Every structure is written in C-alpha cells, then in structure tokens.
Image: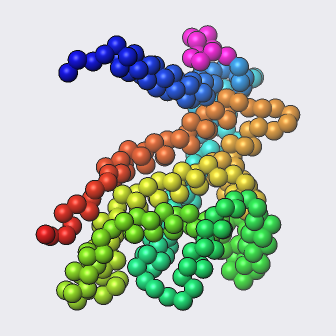
Amino acid sequence: MVEGKAYRGRLVLAHAVLVGFIALVAVPLFMVVSISFRKGNFAVGGILPTPETFSLEHWRMVLGLPVLQADGSWEAPSVSVLRWFWNSVKVSAVSAFLILALSSTCAYAFARMRFFGRDKILGGLLILQMFPMVLALIAIYSILEALGRWIPALGLDTHPGLILAYLGGIATHIWMIKGYFDSLPVSLEESAKIDGATPWQTFRLIMLPTSLPIFAIVFILAFIGLVGEYPLASVVLQRTDQWTLAVGANSFLYEQNYLWGDFAATAVLSGLPITALFLACQRLLVSGLTAGGVKE
C-alpha cells in the first residue's frame, strides 16, 4: 500500500508529540533521582549529578547506614526510613487486600442480587465517592479516639486503626467492580446453578477466577493511593516509629531547613513497591479472560 506524504507527516508528528510527552514526564523523575545522589540538600542543579557533586550520603541515611558528619565522624541516622517503608508497605497491602475483599463481595451483591433499597444504596455510594476522605478528618479522629477507649488496638496511633479508616473509601471500587460484573454473561452463573452450586460457590469458583483483571486493577489502584496518602496518616499516627513513608518524608521539609536530598531519596524509595507491584501483576491486566467460559 502506498502511503501519502500527509500520512507520513502525521505519523512523524504523532511520534514527536509522544516522545515530547514522555520526556516531559521523565524529566521531573530524573531530577528527583539526581537530587538523591547529590551532595547537600539543594533542590537546584542539573538533571544528572556530576562527579564533583555525586554522593551516597542520602541513600546511606535512607538505608540506615552510618553517615559522615561535619566533624569527620560516622554516626547512625537518627530516623529509621526503612521502618517507615515497611509500615507503608504493610498498611497499604493489608488495606488494599481488605478493600478488594469488601468491594468485590458488595459489588457482586449489587450486580446480581435484587433486594430492597438496592438502587438507593448505590446512589448513596455514588454521592459519597464525590467527597474526599480529608473532609472527614475530624469525624475519623473522633471515632478512632472513642474506639480506642474500648479497643486500644483500633484506636489512634495504631496501624489497625488507620487501616480501618482506609476501608471507608471503597465506594469507587464497588462501582468499578460492579460495572465489570455487569459485563459478564449471566449464563456462567446459570450453568453453575443448574449444576447445584450455591451463590457463594458460584462467586468463589466462577466469578473470582473470571474477574482477575479488574481485581488486579482495583488492588493496584488502592495500593498506589494508600502508599502516598498523607493527610489521614499524619493525623492518626503520632509516634515516629509508627509513621508511614509519606508522613516521614514530610518531616524532612520543615520551615527552618528543607532537606531536599533526604526527601528525594525517600521519594524514590516509595516508588519501588509500586513498580514491583506493576511488574508482578502485569500478566493479570489482560482483558478477555472470559472468552471460552461458556461452551457453545
């Protein structure tokens, strides 16, 4: 097929725009990485560190290794960034798993079952997801404070309490999974019902394996949103050893001194679990797993 000059011109223009967009997104990332490998705590400088400015002092601090002080001595960091990192991964992973479990079962009930008030509850969830969680900080703080008097493990300054607060934001995920369930053929469940399967068996053995792509997406989105969550975590968690990575990283930016190098190294560290999660779940992010589920 002969391609005209106009088509080739549009193709070159499209590639140029794509390369420019990728460069626009990548430059800030390269700058953050560069700052983390640069001496001092300055936000200005080149995209890549030079041999004169290259240093591992910020990464030594992040990894808990001794750092060279101004007097020439080596001292261990006063903060444990790796502990904050573990807190973030633990809280985000457990919260994302519980969010997935709750939202998937709720979505299945809304998609396949008929009960009184179903449409009104769905409408209420649609309204609730319009308001960010930060607007309910005072209410969440009061609830956790009162709950902590009866169950200390679920009160303020505890990771279970923070996870419990995060579980309130499942409205968006319920709608997302419900939309996916609505697109699945009902004949799958009807065939299982004819074979004597209960609703729970149908959900566990038919719907769950068939819906792996949307479950992977919901888990990834929930995990990403919680790893970098700051407002709620900064209110609920008060002790330094309980902080998540987002709260700990913000402690490097105080009015008297902005520790940009330490902040940049912590920010790069926070992106590692997200990258690993994408690489682990990329094979699940494929559509069309329902093809062949119904025998003709």
Going 72% across and 83% down the picture, which residue do you hit? 150
> Where on the picture, by quarter, is residue 75?
top right
Going 42% across and 46% down the picture, which residue do you hit? 278
Give the image location of residue 103, x and y in percent: 50, 70
Q: Relative to residue 169, is residue 259 depicted above or below?
A: above
Q: Where does the magenta region start and end?
A: 45-54
Judge by depth and name the residue closer to the eye, 149 or 92.
Answer: 92
Left or right, 145 with respect to 34, comes to: right
Identify the coloring.
Answer: rainbow
Find out whether residue 241 is within the magenta segment. Answer: no
Judge by depth and name the residue closer to the eye, 2 or 216.
Answer: 2
Give the image location of residue 259, x and y in percent: 74, 32
Give the image location of residue 65, x and y in percent: 58, 35
Q: Relative to residue 203, is residue 76 depicted above or below?
A: above
> Where on the picture, by quarter, is residue 233?
bottom right
Residue situated furthest right in the rendering: 256
